[in-house]
Image: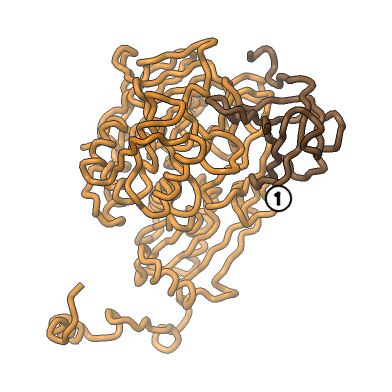
Chain colours: A brown, B orange
Amino acid sequence: MIKYDIFVESLQELPEGEEITVPVRDLTPGIHKYSYKYVRALVSADADRYPEGLLIRFGRGQEYGKPYSMKVLEFVERIPAKYL
Amino acid sequence: MKYFKDNREYIAALEAAGDLVRIRQEVDWDMEAGAIVRKVCEEKAPSPLMENIKDYPGHSYFGAPLATYQRLAMVLGLDRDTPVPKIAEEYLRRTSSAPVKPRVIDKSQAPCKENILLGEDVDLFKLPAPMVHDGDGGRYLCTWHFVVSDDPDVGVNWGMYRQMVYDSKTMTGPVFPFSDMGKTLYGKYIPKGLPMPFATVIGPDPLSAIASCAPSPIPETEFAGQLMGEPVELVKCETCDLYVPAHAEIIIEGEVLPDVKLEECPFGEYTGYRTSPRDLRTVYRVKCITYRNNPITTISNMGVPTDEGQLLRSFSLGLELEKLLRSQGIPITGVYMVPESTHHVMVVGVKNAYTGIAQQVASLAFGSKLGPWFHMVVVVDDSVNIYNYAEVLHAVTTRCHPVKGITVYEQGVGTPLYPFLSAEERKWSKGPKVLFDCLFPLDWDSNSETPRLVSFKTVYPREIQEKVLGNWEAYGYKNR
């Protein structure tokens, strides 16, 4: 099941099996659909390798046809604590 | 003067005029609502009022609120079929009067305070932010709205700065350094590491919306009063010292963070393209949401012409430039910015009274506060109707010398939204400009060198014209 999507300029931003920290959008249906989360994660071009589906969009919103997969290792907060 | 105090009065008037469609079947906030508004803009169809939004009972959408000149005429108290030059006259008449200070009313009298969310109750996703276009970077809650800020030296500013919902308490959006709020944010708050209070006004009354997108030197609170002919009613925010229009539909209060940036974009923009790059942009942290019962969220859908941003920005940019040029004593006959140019082409009519007048006009236009928002100035003489695209195009193609008539200004201020710029130019808001001087040179001999315009009105004696017009139907033609 597709759970997240991500905007990239190039697929090279998604190295196979390497840990990356990126903003993704939560596509879970409901009122919070499209909310952003910042995640430390592993991604793969193999749609079945990791538990979460990941759709790819390029810089002007164009969809990349082939879904990736992702494993979220950690949700990271980017807003400094003094503002939370 | 007649004006609509809120969008509810305006919606009723639109419906009475047959320029509103109530959509009662369920509409999905996820692209369907945006697609409806886009098609309405492209077909110049009646404004949609969507009364049943998926996941958001009690909320409505009001789309394309001011996307036509007929609607603009209505909100200025004119007949819907008023010609554009007459609408411009009314705008100039109202906005040349004395500024009108706003009036502060008590919270108990302010409809926008009917519901107040604070603290843990604040969740932007409780509001029906639409996914306006497929491929947008997020849900743009704020497409027809304005952001209130206060410069400690200059005063209050209202400006339309788009805002995307990032998470439950965060929005992001571009704030360019040359904009009014940008000057305050980058000049006064960020250097001190201070958060800047803001209040976003969604669903403002039509004249306040116009005031917020007019690049006038007068504070928008007073400019709105000029347009209305009486003070705009404001009410104090819950969490800061800013004041907002009391009759607006939704108010979002919070702080612009000085030391954090988050992703925003892509977005279908007013130029008709997705142009500006996805980037780290200004962060708005939300502290409070207030709203009217059964709030009506306004949606503007930017894209190919014509939406209200293109129409109203063109209208007000043109007329503010007219005021500026007249204030400098330049013998202009009028200024019109073509909405279909997505406010990029300024057409200036002049009396061809002295050599260099076109250069003078362009220098003032590009060098003014208005300059970053357009990059072409076309100067024509008073034989050309500036509102007639065909006449203007004819003048450009026949009177503008391809070498001597075109002046390129390479180093202007532009916006990252210009589709023709390179990535590097967008990054630094570089904005090359161009003047098309469509005036025949005054040093040509008017008898032997200057071409004569060949039209019915210019090459026949008056008595022949009157004879032909008088016999037009007798010849077998219909008078139009």
Q: Nearer the viewer, residue B292 or A54?
A: A54
Which image quarter is the N terminus of chain B in? top left
Residue type indicated by callout 1: Ala
Residue at x 28% of width, y 47% of height: B73
Residue B428 in view of the camera: no
Left or right? Give the position of B81 relative to B110.
Answer: left
In the rendered view, would you say B447 is above or below B285?
A: below
Residue B474 in view of the camera: yes
Which image quarter is the C terminus of chain B in? bottom left
In the rendered view, would you say B198 is above or below B306?
A: above
- The image quarter containing residue B472 is bottom left
- The image quarter containing residue B455 is bottom left
Left or right? Give the position of B93 relative to B299.
Answer: left
Residue B17 position within the rendered picture, expressed as x and y whole percent measured from the top left: 22, 45
Q: Residue furthest top?
A: B119
Residue B408 position within the rendered picture, expressed as x and y whole percent measured from the top left: 61, 63
Q: Nearer the viewer, residue A69 or B49?
A: A69
Residue at x 79% of width, y 21% of height: A73
Residue located beneath label 1 in the image: B423
Residue at x 53% of width, y 60% of height: B376
- The image quarter containing residue B285 is top right
